[in-house]
Amino acid sequence: MADEKAITKQVPPSLIQKPEVNMVKSDFDALIQQKGYDVYHDHAVKCPCSSKDGAAPQPTCQNCGGSGWFYVNRIKTRMVFQSMNVNTKLKEWSQERLGTVNITARSEDRISFMDRLTLIDSESEHSQVVFLKKQPDTTKLYGTLRYNPIEFYSVFLYKGVSQKHQLLIEGVDFTVDRNQIKLLLIDDGDMANPTISIRYKHQAEYTVLDLPRDVMVATIKDECTRKNKDVQFPISAVGRRSHYMIDRNNYNNDNLLDNSF
């Protein structure tokens, strides 16, 4: 092209009597396969519903739910997770959970900012308060959990400041479908703002927030042709626990569109 500038090539150093050391990609991939965790990898895509002036995404968008991100093409793979923790930092009348993890993934599993990684065989504890709503045309209350629960430790119904919380029993007082919890109406009358407190187990989920080693390319010699070729090696990322799921559906499972291809 006419606007390209001239490029001056730097003189390479002498390699006489310098032995060549090659990395072996298959060894790195074997480590991930043998020592890694089974993972669901959801690919994050920036939603185009935002305006040109950079304003917030449209709150009524059924692709991202107003978050600005949507997820496509879930795959099952294996990745290495290290330094998993749930550090706590006390602030004014609140507790901020800062669990972070170092992630190593094969070059074939391209991970990027805001991707979601779910450890399939993991179990983590979480506690939250759910504000229940009346299910239209029924006698049931329902609410949305932040994760799909594996097992409940306790579910308490708030009865008032001067009464003990009512312990609820799964299968008797409530049922669960994915991340939706359903309760029968309470016998002692309709409550203005029914609220329950839940502690439960769920699969650990992380959101990718940093990529310290997004690219790692090494030149190695092909065993067949004996010619040099560039090979992509495993990449490294940093994830943080996801306590607010971007793409949670509503009770009828019809508020978000699936853009997977």
Image (cartoon, grey):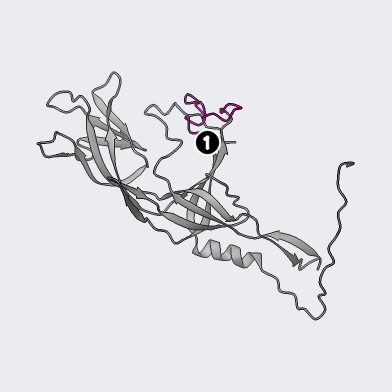
Rendering coords of residue 156 (x, y %): 20, 40
Magenta span: 49-71
- 152 vs 163: above or below: below
The kind of residue tagged 1 is: Trp
Q: Is residue 199 left or right of residue 243?
A: left
Answer whether residue 62 is magenta in the image: yes
Q: Which residue lies under the disc numbered 1?
A: 69
**Residue in the foreground of this view, choosing between 67 and 40:** 67
Determine the residue located farthest toward the left in the rendered image. 162
Relative vertical location of residue 113 with respect to residue 174 in this rendering, above or below: below
**210 with respect to 129 (left or right):** right
Q: Residue at x 62, y 54 (%)?
A: 214
Magenta stretch, main secondary structure class: loop
**Looking at the figure, which quarter contains the N terminus?**
top right
Q: Quadrant of the C terminus?
A: top right
* Numbered circles on residues, count: 1
Q: Give how far across and how far down residue 144 sits, in percent.
A: 34, 34
Which of 21/26 is in front?
Answer: 21
Residue 56 position within the rendered picture, expressed as x and y whole percent measured from the top left: 51, 29
Q: Is residue 114 above or below residue 142?
A: below
Q: Residue at x 83, y 63 (%)?
A: 10
Q: Is residue 146 magenta?
A: no
Q: Residue furthest front?
A: 92
Seen from this angle, which residue lies furthest right? 2
Image: 59 above or below 78: above
Indicate the position of residue 16 as horizontal and vertical percent values.
82, 78
Location of residue 88 by image quarter? bottom left
- Mark 1 neighbour density, 10 Å: few (under 14) some (14–19) many (20 or more): many
* View extreme (bottom): residue: 17
What residue is drawn where x is 60% and y is 65%?
A: 28
| SS category of the residue bearing label 1 | strand
Which quadrant of the figure has residue 52? top right
